[in-house]
Image (cartoon, rainbow, N blue to C red):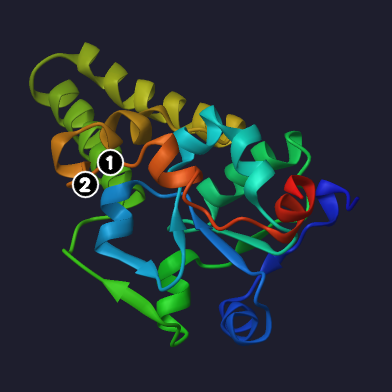
Amino acid sequence: MTSPSAVTALAPQALQSWFKEHQDLMVIDVRSAAEFESMHIRGSYNVPLPLLSEHTGDLAARLGSRVVLVCQSGVRAEQARQRMATAGLDTAYVLTGGVPGFAAAGGDVVKGKGRWDLERQVRLVAGSLVMLGLAGGKFVSPNLRMLAGAIGTGLTFSAATNTCAMGKALSAMPWNKAAKEPTRESAILQLPVTAAEEDAAA
C-alpha cells in the first residue's frame, strides 16, 4: 500500500485527462449538498464530509483504486483523505483548487442555483464578529473586545486541528440546506460497484 504521506495533489488539468483515460475514476465531492447543487464537477458523487466521517468504512469499501476527493479549496477534501486513509484507502488524490479551480481550468461542471460557498460564509461571519467586537469595545464596553480575541483563538484552533466548528454550525443553517439532503443510502450505497466488489461477490 502507498503511504498516506506519498499521496499527492492532483491538478485540474490532470483530472480532465483522467476522465478521458480511466474508466475506474471516481470523483467524490465532500462539500455540503447545497454547495454541490450550486456547482459540481460533471460525473462526481456528493458525499458530504460529515456523512463520510460517519460512514468512512462503508465508503472505503465501495471505492476503487483511482479516487479523487474534491471540495471548495482542498481543505475538506484533505480531511476526507485522512479519514479514508484510516479505513485503509490510502491512494486517494485531492484536487488542487477544488471545484472552482477545475471550472477555471475549463473543466466540465454543472451549475445550479448560485450560493456562497461555506468557506466564504465562514470568512464573512468571522470578520464581522471581529469588527463588531472591536467597534463594541471602543463605543460600548472594552469587554466586547474579548469577542475579537475569542474569534482569533477559534480560528487558530481551527487551523491547528484542521477542523472548523463555525463551518459545521453554518452548514446546518436553512440557507445551506439542499432540497434533498443525502443519506447513507442515497450517497454511499448508490456508488457504482467496483471490480473488486464484483470479484468478492462472485
**Residue 169, percent across and down?**
30, 28
**Circle 2 sits on which residue?**
178
Q: What amino acid is at disc 2?
A: Ala
**Structural crowding at the residue carrying mark 2, measured as other residues with C-alpha within 10 Å and reported as few (<14), some (14–19) or many (≥20):** some
Q: What amino acid is at disc 1?
A: Glu
Q: Is residue 125 left or right of residue 175?
A: right
Q: Answer whether labels 2 and 1 touch (C-beta < 8 Å).
A: yes
**Structural crowding at the residue carrying mark 1, measured as other residues with C-alpha within 10 Å and reported as few (<14), some (14–19) or many (≥20):** few
Residue 181: give its label: 1
* 103 up-or-down from 88: above or below: below
Identify the element where label 2 is drawn.
Answer: loop
Q: Residue at x 46, y 64 (%)?
A: 44
**Residue 121, percent across and down?**
26, 46
Query: Residue 172: which quarter of the image?
Result: top left
Q: Residue at x 70, y 56 (%)?
A: 92
Q: Is residue 116 left or right of residue 96?
A: left
Q: Is residue 2 left or right of residue 196?
A: right
**Residue 40, percent across and down?**
37, 66
- Alpha carbons under labels 2 and 1: distance apart: 6 Å
Identify the element where label 1 is drawn.
Answer: loop
Q: Residue at x 63, y 48 (%)?
A: 62
